[in-house]
Image (cartoon, rainbow, N blue to C red):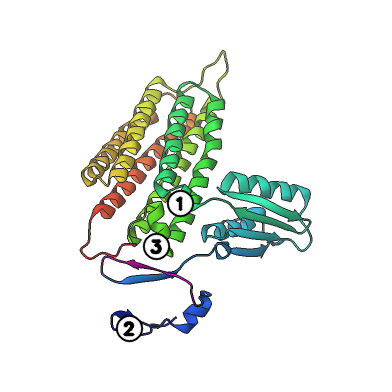
Amino acid sequence: MKEEKRKIQLTGGSTLTISLPIKWARETGLKQGDELSLIQRSDNSLVITPEKKEKEQIKSAEFEFSEEESFEDNFRYLIAYYLVGYDLVKLLSPNGFGAEERKRIKEVVRKRLIGMEVVGESSREIVLQSFLKYEDFTLRDAVRSMSEIILSMHADAISSLDERDANLAEDVIERDNEIDRFYLLIVRQLKAAMSDPDLAKKIGVGRQRDSLGYRIVVKCMERIGDHVENIAKNSMMINSKSSISEPASLGVKSLEGIKEIGFRAEKLFTKTLASLSNMGMKEANEAIRDANALIDKLEGINERVLVEELSITDKIHILSILESLGRIAKYCTDIAEVTINMGTRIAGELEF
């Protein structure tokens, strides 16, 4: 709708009124007797929103699974519907879903989309509905859960290398799905908060730019999870050479170096998330200095690995692990910088 201007009218000698744009009123389904919510912002502007009705809360959509595209290509479309906030999504297939395809859709939805459940199906249709209420799981709750999983994965990934435990490494790889689920949930929350000031307050987003800041933060956290997964995968490749009578060929110096950097990266991530939680700008700067020191330390360990008596294959896996630890440190730097930006106040800034 284009900008419209309304003159203020004096009614009854003491009440100021304005008329509402008729097009907007029709689109929102307003009628006489309905209530509007008025929110005053810090710049004295008013946000006017219709009171939500139960029947209007369910946003539905449908899309057709394309036979010309792969399963993953089609599933990306479903993720897009999930992220923009649809509560009910109908998946359609003109020629019908095969048994294996139907089973796979259900499994992947459970693994990757928090709150989405299959509520109906037929030979040519699968109906998914989200039962998660945003206010029941705040942004802070989601970020905390995501960070706890990452810390647990990180500790186990380093332990799997130290203890030559391929099963533990495999478990770390599986848990990366949980990180992806929380990432998608938080992006869905942030998108919804941008168009709903009341919801933004409920989930803990105070300003519009905070949504962008948290969007960057959770993307960094998702990438950290990917690098932890990479550490576990490379750990398995090294462990695959070992047997009961023949231990893995990972050198003692290399192992100790990785363990030291791994422990420091874990402490760095914890400090970075603490600075974000408290909006501690000084603590965020400390985290950035720690990250830079860790990256400098990595250079020396890389050189040590190159001259150590190890197979070329083992060196490749070890260097990949060290590269991931360095990337984790850099993503922590990004989170800390966002924390400093978010912690800086702007006079007259709009709030939800």
**Stretch of the chain drawn in magenta:** 32-43
- Disc 3 is placed on an element classified as helix
- Disc 1 is placed on an element classified as helix
Q: Quick check: marks 2 and 1 in contact, CB under 8 Å?
A: no
Query: In this figure, which residue is indicated by the disc labeled 2?
Result: 12
Q: Determine the residue located farthest toward the top in the rendered image.
A: 245
Q: Position of residue 321 (x, y in %)?
A: 43, 35
Query: In this figure, which residue is indicated by the disc labeled 1?
Result: 135
Q: Quadrant of the C terminus?
A: bottom left
Of the image marks 3 and 1, the number of the one nearer the N terminus: 1
Q: Amino acid at mark 1?
A: Glu
Q: Amino acid at mark 2?
A: Gly
Where is residue 304, by image quadrant?
top left
Q: Is residue 17 visible?
A: yes
Q: Quick check: marks 3 and 1 in contact, CB under 8 Å?
A: no
Q: Position of residue 327 (x, y in %)?
A: 38, 42
Q: Position of residue 31 (x, y in %)?
A: 51, 77
Q: Amino acid at mark 3?
A: Pro
